[in-house]
Amino acid sequence: MNKKGKIVILLVVILIIVIALNYFISSNTVYLGNNTKVLVIGNKIIKLKNNRKILLNKVSIYKDGKKFDGYLKSEKYDMGYSYYAVSKYNKKFNSNDLVASGKMVKMNAVSSSNIETSFNVSEINSLLELKLENDNVIDYKKVTFDIDNDSNNEEIVFIKYIVDNIGTTKAFVVDNEDITDIVEFEYDYTDMVNIKNDVHYLSDVIDLNNDKKYEIILARIDGDSQPTYYDIYSYENGNIKEIK
């Protein structure tokens, strides 16, 4: 075989490897929102920070604990590509809080029946040793579920409140009355020059790698014009670990 023939064969082999690698990654990727991806290999969860153009990927779409078959697409915008999904019934799932996975990933999502957005301010005050009024609380979400597979339900709580012009955003886990913080931020609304425009909220509680232990997904918007990123946390034995 001449040199030209060997080069052609080498290029074909490289092309096959690239196609196979792309298929493997796409099939084992979970897409969160418009630009956060997670590669799932067995029990390993690897967060991917980059995004790329997607022509048409067959995915499973998760919404309110339900699963739909569909296709993932992308749209170009000034900071990269945003994702959205379309079900086989042509229903569109927008990028905000989108959860979609390649066909090799088997996830479980907490049902909306386990999620509360109404609150009892007396319970919050007792839990956090505060003296809030109803008007102080501006955002609240609680998920009650056994996230660490220990046969006991935990509570994943997200709350945002303002007292004396100080805004506080907290996310934490309540397990047998023990509180484990996930994140906490404070904003001084009297200092409008230096105040941050960050927005945080509890997006989802999902078992990304089908190991019966659920990950906590927090949404994060770093400023008014920035895209939404999704931070992933695991909880076990009273410990929070961020998956980076």
Image (cartoon, grey):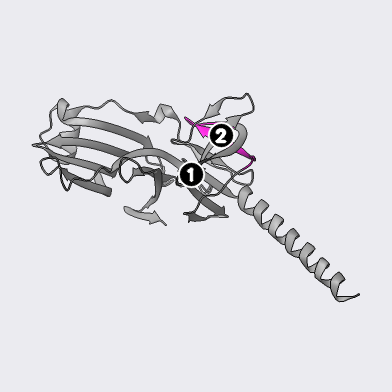
Confirm whether residue 176 shows in the render. no
Eyeballing the image, is 14 above or below 23? below
Q: Which residue does the image show at 53% across and 55% down from the upper left?
A: 43
**Residue type at mark 2?**
Ala
Q: Quarter of the image holding residue 2?
A: bottom right
Residue nearer the viewer, 195 or 172: 195
Q: What predominant SS class does the magenta segment belong to?
A: strand
Q: Quarter of the image holding residue 21?
A: bottom right
The residue that disc 2 covers is 85
The residue that disc 1 covers is 207
Residue interval drawn in magenta? 55-68
In this view, the mark in front (2 or 1): 2
Q: Residue furthest right?
A: 1
Measured from the top left, where is residue 53 in percent x and y?
A: 58, 46
Q: Which residue does the image show at 49% across and 54% down from the upper left?
A: 48
Q: Secondary structure at mark 1?
A: strand
The tag earlier along the polypeptide, 2 or 1, is 2
